[in-house]
Amino acid sequence: MYDVAVIGAGVVGSHTAGRLAAMGHSVAVVEGKRSLTEPVCCTGIIGRECVTSFAIGEDIIMRWVKGARVFSPSGKPLKLWRPEPQAAIVDRVSLNVSMISRAQGRGAHYEVGTLVRDIEVADDRVRIKAVRGNSPVYLEARAAVIATGFRPGLTERLGLGRTGDFVAGVQAEVSAPGVEDVEVYLGREVAPSFFAWMVPTTSGMGLVGLLSRQTPEVYLRKLLSLLADRGKIASADVEVLHGGISLKPLAKTYGDRLLVVGTAAGQVKPITGGGIYYGLLCANIAAEHLHRALSADNLSARDLAGYQREWKQRLGSELRTGYWARRVYERFSDRQIDRLFDIMESTGILESLLNAKDLSFDWHGGAVSRVISYEVFRKIIGSMKLPARLKDRMPGRE
């Protein structure tokens, strides 16, 4: 019997496994994919803070970026740029492999091509029921960490609540010669209530994707055709990857002998859908709490509840503010978004935000609070037909 079974061999799951193995615990990582090098539906943009905090190797970083060009629904560009690099575009498969290698180097064991069907929590262990090919597989551990990414059925069956809100993501790798800048596209005809992107990766290649609540591939195919017509990409005939992103955390991310981390827990930036950095931060917290619980041989929900208290203390305010901004943005019309672009440039607000040293790529709450501190934005939001709960939860409202 293992000390811990980690369900999911993504970045967050492997980092959790590596930390626990380094603390002297026996760890099994159970991964449903048959190959650990399968493509991932993730753009792989992480901030400098993440790169430094988790020792992301330069060999994994494809390029650094100083900002992006954001296009309004009418095509008006807004240049969000700073003198120094703000984020790194990483090879997502290589990042996975790197984290797996670290965990294996510390003693973690991997069960690849093993799809978990159910987890049974007993008084003294968890029993994992899985399948490999056509053969059943059974594993036992003193505790389990769920790091499956977006897979709400498993956590719901374990009594940890339902995913409160989520969005579908789609992405394709494209030939994009000459594209050197990150581009973001807004508008209901492109990605209703969300946004689309084109991100350069290696020389001559890039990623095009978007988030949408409905028919995301339809919108992506339309965008790919448009970009091909404009000569920005070589062809719209490309394979599309799909994924899901939680926009709100689970009600409970702990239980008897259980913890949930990363996208599975909803530890995701609600504005952008990015989950790597927050997931890694929470993986560290999860590993520390599990280490103490395993050492004391006390793995009850009551004793593991400190994990949720700690990660919410670190991220709770950030996630609440980001989700508020996400819900408000979804109610903007294309015309209102274009107007906001004009205001940002004509009033000097954009320049002020870009010069603010305390604003970060990884922490959006400060930027949201700074934006709505301007009277012009508060008036726009105040004039919108928002539900009372959104108006009442405006950051900074007394």
Image (cartoon, helix red, strand yellow):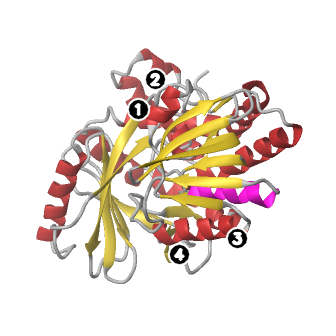
Viewer-nearest residue: 86 or 33: 33
Report whether residue 327 is seen. yes
Q: Label for residue 61?
A: 4
Crowding at mark 4 (Cα within 10 Å: few <14, some 14-19, many 20+) = many
Q: Which residues are magenta?
A: 11-23
Q: Is residue 84 magenta?
A: no
Locate residue 308, reporting x and y percent.
69, 33
Residue 374 sits above or below residue 279 on the image: above
The residue that label 1 is drawn on is 327
Mark 4 or 3 closer to N-term? 4
Locate residue 13, reporting x and y percent.
60, 53
Residue drawn at x 54%, y 34% is 249
What kind of residue is marked 3?
Gly
Residue 30 sits above or below residue 387 on the image: below
Outermost residue toward the top?
388
Q: Tell me the CA gap for discs 3 and 1.
A: 43 Å
What kind of residue is marked 2?
Leu
Q: Nearer the viewer, mark 4 or mark 3?
A: 3
Residue drawn at x 44%, y 16% is 388
Q: Tell me the CA gap for discs 4 and 3.
A: 22 Å
Mark 3 or 1 closer to N-term? 3
The residue that label 3 is drawn on is 105
The residue that label 2 is drawn on is 390
Q: Nearer the viewer, mark 3 or mark 1?
A: 3
